[in-house]
Structure formats: structure tokens, C-alpha cells
Amino acid sequence: MSEASRGKDVLATLDEHVPTSFYWKLTLLATVGGFLFGYDTANIGSVLNFVPYELSDLATGYLVAGASLGAAVGAFFAGPLTDKFGRKSLLVADAGIYAAGAILSAVAWNVEVLLIARTLIGLAVGADSAIATAYIAEYAPKNRRGALSILQQWMITVGIFVSYVIAFVVLRAMPQHTSTVDWRLILGLGAIPALLALVLRTQMPESPRWLLKQGRFDDVRKAVAQLGHEVTTEQIRASAQATLTPPEQEGEQKRSRIRDWTPGVRRALIVVVVFFVFQQITGINVPFYYGPRILDPYFGGGSEVDAATLAVGVTAIMAAVNVIATYFAFRFIDRIGRRRLAIAGFTGMAVFILVGAIGDGLLAGIAKIIVVLIALDFFIASFAVGVGGTGWLIQGEVFPTAVRGRAAAIGATADWLANFALILLFPIWTSAIGLSWVMVCFAALCLMAVAFVAAYLPETKGLSVEQITEVFTKAASAGVLARPKRLHGQDETQQKTG
């Protein structure tokens, strides 16, 4: 038996263990969906100008934003399915659905098939986004849960970057085949990591907390053993008795499910949903979905393919900034905390998108290009450090095990619906008031997000997922406008035991 597990119940063993290399490998595998999410976000922007089919305005909008709508549906239905069938089985299925969608995209023989493929991809990445961080939160040690969970956001940024690099290389290598081979290859290559994930995810352990909730004690012991701990069946039963109410004491099952949605859970869900909406409507995905199209006029003067390729390359640089900045979120999320990073991130976004608005509206020539590109890079960096990973992290950690899958799915659904709405309406919005004023609107929304986070998001670093539930329960009992506090004495306790 490992030292960490001696004299402790199963949940304490999981919460206090130092992550091994297996934890990091498992988390990377769990967040492959994040990579696919990022890859899909970027590849449609790269090929949009080269798809040879005649597209109506509605079809064009759905081609870009339709995957987000499919993702909202996938995320919504993933919640009850993952609470019933487990986290692992859904993660395996998601990888298979994405692979099918990517392959269908590559061989699409008309626009209808391409739109169906985009919808399949959306279903897969949406379901995965609802499950991955919930799965991670259920095995991650409490003092490293932030770093492990933020790998979801890091994988998204890596997927965006890789997609733009691949697009740039393919377009530069075969500029004469942009409307035949290139766009199909860029879309279809996403099937490779999806197929690898399909195979490797079958070897993942199921979530110990989910298994414990189901009363599958032998499977709990096996899952915990895969994570590097040896625990006895007696310890597992003691953990279940200490943390779960036996089904026979819950009464009728439907009433039990209703009671799981306590005022504290509902408050946590509102916080996550609003945070996710702000995460999207403040504009972060506009540079990645529409970057090449927005930047294309800045690099006019050559051929259409050369200008588009250069715009893709510049957008790839923005994606690289996103990857690098997310590393700092990974480093600081468990030190500085979720709340302070989120406030700093939204504040930075507001400042730099205003700089971009000034550059786009008042400058011209090289000065305009330099100011706008630098402003967008710092806007993206601010999001990556303080906002992107924080959203996915709180989605996974603030709900109790009984409803974590469903609640996380509702949060992910809100995220995707907000993303869909913004991406669909952005061209109309820009045509109506101009890009500069759209940027000003984004800045105002960022400041609104700062006010919301300051008022309603508690600091949850260093708390177990069970303790976080208690924080929201106390805030709910204190009233609608009450600002949730950390558990009294938690910091001091951590210092004594750390």
C-alpha cells in the first residue's frame, strides 16, 4: 500500500497525492478533444476562401459556426449520458465520432455532405468539452487540479497552432491545388489524432469518484490502482459511507436526482454559465475563425492565394502566442488562484482590444498593421493567461459528483451557444458598425466580465471538490447577492499541512 493511502479514505488519497507521470499522460489523453476542438476552430478559417462549392450566406455562416451549434447539442446530451454510463465510455465515443466527421469532410462530394461532416465534428468536440475537465477533476490532487485541468485549454491552443501551421505549409507547397486537394487535406488530417485517441482512450481508468457513486467498489479499487495507489475494499466502503447517502435512504430515485440540484449547485451552475458566456462574447475566437479573412485586406497587392497564405501565416503567429501564454496560466493557476487570474485576464483583454480599435480606426499603412497585430497578440495572451483555462477548470471542479457530468455539460452548452451566436453574427455586426466599434464593444463586455468575476467567483484553489461544493452552498444560503467566501480557516489549515 502506498504511503499516501495509509490511514486515509480513498478521496483523501486522491486529493493529497503528488501527481506521477501517469497522471500527466492520462490528462493529455483526456484532453485530446481539446486539441481537436482547437484544430477544428482554426482549419475552417484557413480553407474558407478555397472551398469550391457555391455557398449561400446562410451556408457560409453555418460552415463556420455550424460546428459550434453541433457542439452545443453534443455537450447538452453528453451530461446525462456520462453521469449514467461513465466518463471513459463517452470520451472513447467522442474520438470515434470526430474521426468520422474529419474523414467525411475530406471526401465531401457536395456542400450538404460537408455541412453534415461539420455537424458531426461539432457533436464530438462539444461532448468532449463537457466531459474532459469533469473527468480530470475527479482524480486530480486538489493542489494540482488547476495545472492538470488547464491542459484542456493548452491543448486547444496547440490544436489551433498546429492547424494554422499545417494550413500554411500545405498552401505554400501546393498553391495550384487550393480548391482541389489542399482544403480536403487540411480538414481530413484531424482524423489522425482522433483515431489515436480512439485506441488509447480504451486503456484509461474510469473516474474513481464516479465509480464510487455507482457503488462499484471493486472497479474503484482497480481504477485507483491504475493511478498508483493501493486501497482496500474496506477503505472504499468507508469512503462511500462518509461521503454518499445510500440509495435505500434516498427514497424514490427521481426525487433523489431532484434533491441533488441544491441551491448551492444551482448557484455554481449560474456562475459557470455566465463565465462561459463572457469567455466567448468578449471576442477571443474571432481572430481564429475569421483571422485570415480579417487580415487578408491588410496584405493585398499580390495574388489572392499569396495574400490568403500570408494571412494564415500571421494568424499562426497569434496561435503561437496563445500556446505560450497558456503555459503561464498552467504555471500560476494553482499559485495565484482562479479569481485573480480571471480578473487580470479580462482587464488585459479590455485594454488591448481598445488599442486595436484605435489602431484600426485612426491609423493607416504599416503603422496600422503593426498596432493591430500587436494589440491582438496581447489580447489573446491576456485571455490565455487568465480566462481560457479558468473557465474549463471551474466547469470541472465546482459541482458535486452526483451531477458533475450534467452540470458541466450545461456549462459547455452555454459556451458553445455563445460561441455560435458570436461567430454567426460577427460579419453582420462588423458590416453594421465597422471592425473598430466591434472591438470597442468587446472591451465593454470585458469590463462587465471583470465586475461579474469580482462579485461572484470564489477562490477555489487548494480545496477539494467536496469543499468547493460547500463554499457555494454557504453562498447560496447567504443570499443572491452574497459573494462566496473560501472555507473559514482553509488557508491556515493548508499551511500547517502543506
Image: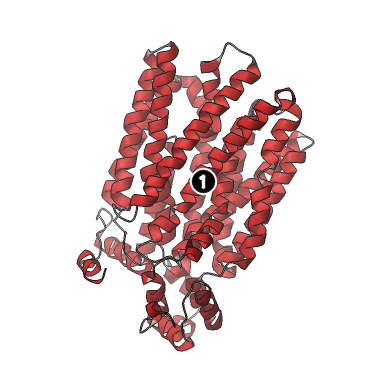
Foreground residue, 13 or 94? 13
Name the residue at 48% across, 60% down. 24
Residue 468 occupies which quadrant of the picture?
Answer: bottom left
Foreground residue, 92 or 314? 314
Instruction: Give the crowd class for mark 1: few <14, some 14-19, many >=20 residues within 10 Å.
Output: many
Asked whether residue 202 appears in the rendered view, the answer is yes
> As drawn, which residue projects farthest toward the bottom?
234
Q: Tell me where residue 189 appears, x and y as whole percent.
A: 68, 42
Asked whether residue 56 appears in the rendered view, the answer is no
Residue 400 occupies which quadrant of the picture?
Answer: bottom left
Name the kind of residue labelled 1 in the image. Answer: Ile
Q: Is 95 left or right of 15, judged from the image as shown?
A: right
Residue 471 occupies which quadrant of the picture?
Answer: bottom left
Foreground residue, 399 or 146? 146
The residue tagged with tag 1: helix, strand or loop?
A: helix
Q: For the N terminus, give its image quadrant.
A: bottom left
Q: Is residue 470 depicted above or below 112 in this figure?
A: below
Q: For the C terminus, give its image quadrant.
A: bottom left
Name the residue at 54% across, 67% down. 83
Name the residue at 35% across, 66% down. 469
Foreground residue, 325 or 108? 325
Name the residue at 30% across, 44% down. 343
Q: Is 478 left or right of 262, judged from the image as shown?
A: left
Q: Tell me where residue 184 appears, x and y as whole percent.
A: 72, 36
Q: Is residue 477 depicted above or below 125 in this figure?
A: below
Q: Tell me where residue 109 appears, x and y as whole percent.
A: 80, 36
Instruction: Check disc 1 and report the residue beneath it.
Output: 156
Q: Is 73 left or right of 278, judged from the image as shown?
A: right
Q: Tell me where residue 371 appears, x and y as whole percent.
A: 39, 21
Q: Is 485 left or right of 173, judged from the image as shown?
A: left
> As drawn, which residue projects farthest toward the right?
109
